[in-house]
Image: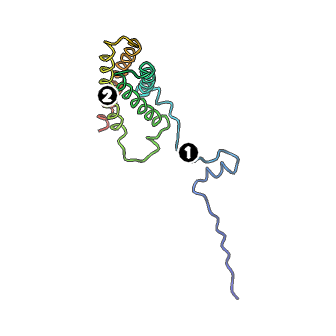
Amino acid sequence: MMTETVVNVEQVPANNNANKNTTQGGPQPSRFGWIQMNLEYFKTTPGMLKIAEFIIGILCMSFATPPQTGTGFFLLVVTISFVLTLIWIFVYFLGVREATNFPINWILTEFLNTGVVTFLYFLGFIVQLITWSSRYHYKGVNITAGIFGMINTGVYAFASYLLYLEWKNRN
């Protein structure tokens, strides 16, 4: 007589915690589970500098608009810098650096970005102040934009210096 063998196979999920949460009515697993909001970064000096760059960039854009003759380069620099700073804010806020495994030297990349922006801001505020020092129409707000551009150049330069120190300490 032949004996019969019965094998029951139960598939165990790779992540038991996620399965327990969903069966017990807990939070559903998310496709964006790697995102963690990092507010602690913005309590540090580099984080506060990013917020300052962002706010001063808004002031520069608001004072230099509508674009008049000679303001185009300054507005281009301010807008590009604003967008790049906003991207870096999101990188730190969402923890993208920690969540990705790309072979990127984040500190060096940010240092080069901030250094180039510092140089462009320097050129931009000089062009803005030279252009508007001899004009009379909308002179006050455009000179104010140039002064805020000068202030933001200093903020970017200090952030570049801190990034340079951090990069040198890691290498």
- Residue 11 rendering spot, x and y as whole percentages: 62, 63
107, 85: nearer the viewer? 85
Q: Residue drawn at (43%, 23%), measured in percent from left and top?
A: 61
Residue extending farthest to the bottom is 1
Q: Residue drawn at (34%, 31%), measured in percent from left and top?
A: 114
Quickly name the residue at label 2: 120
The label on residue 33 is 1
Q: Which label's residue is closer to the chain start, 2 or 1?
A: 1
- Residue 145 rendering spot, x and y as whole percentages: 39, 18
Please name the amino acid that badge 2 sits on: Leu
Left/right of residue 146 with respect to residue 90 in the rendered view: left
Q: Quadrant of residue 118?
A: top left
Q: Quadrant of the C terminus?
A: top left
15, 122: nearer the viewer? 122
**Pointer 2 and pointer 1: residues touching (CB < 8 Å)?**
no
Q: Quadrant of the N terminus?
A: bottom right
- Secondary structure category for the residue under label 2: helix
Residue density around tag 1, few if under 14, some if 14–19, many if 20 or more, within 10 Å: few
The label on residue 154 is none
Query: Which one is in front in this view, the residue at disc 2 or the one at disc 1?
Result: 2
- Residue 98 rendering spot, x and y as whole percentages: 45, 41
Placement of 9 over or under 53, stated as above or below: below
Left/right of residue 40 with respect to residue 29 in the rendered view: left
Q: CA distance from mark 2 to mark 1?
A: 37 Å
